Amino acid sequence: MPRIIDKDVCLGCGACASTCPVEAIAESDGLYAVDADTCIDCGACEGGCPAGAIKEA
């Protein structure tokens, strides 16, 4: 299942985007979002998020 980023917790740091092997995470209005169609559900972004803002959808 693709991941989602809790916008209330996201710091907007971009650490998650740099860990995504398929570039499924992009910045939008200062925060980040996961493109569910591109996400391969590897979980790399969860470990890369210092705020713990990423969860399974």
Image (cartoon, rainbow, N blue to C red):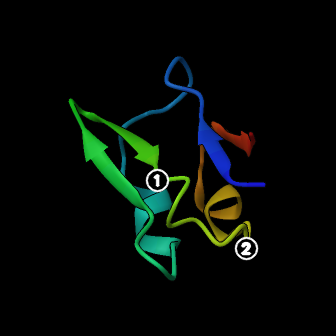
Nearer the N terminus, badge 1 or badge 2? 1
Q: Position of residue 23 (x, y in %)?
A: 40, 72
Q: Specify few, some or many for label 1: CA neighbours under 10 Å numbering under 14, 14-19, or 20 or more.
A: some
Amino acid at the residue labelled 1: Asp
Number of marks present in the image shown? 2
Cα–Cα gap, marks 1 and 2: 13 Å
Residue at screen point 69% across, 56% down: 46
Question: Which mark lies nearer to you, 1 or 2?
Answer: 1
Q: Residue at x 58, y 65 (%)?
A: 39
Quadrant of the frame with the C terminus: top right
Left or right of residue 1, residue 16 in this image: left
- The front one of 51 and 3 is 3
The disc at residue 35 is 1
| Residue drawn where x is 53% and y is 17% of the image | 8
Q: Residue furthest left?
A: 29
**Position above or below: 39 against 52:** below
Residue 53 spot, x, y in % from top left: 63, 36
Q: Position of residue 17 (x, y in %)?
A: 42, 63
Question: In which quadrant will I find the N terminus?
Answer: bottom right
Residue 32 image point, x, y percent:
38, 42
The residue that disc 2 covers is: 42
Instruction: Please say if 34 is above or below 16.
Output: above
Is disc 1 placed on a helix, strand or loop? Answer: loop
Q: Secondary structure at mark 2?
A: loop
**Amino acid type at image mark 2:** Cys
| Residue furthest top as drawn | 8
Q: Is residue 41 left or right of residue 4?
A: right
Question: Which one is nearer the viewer's eye here, 1 or 16?
Answer: 1
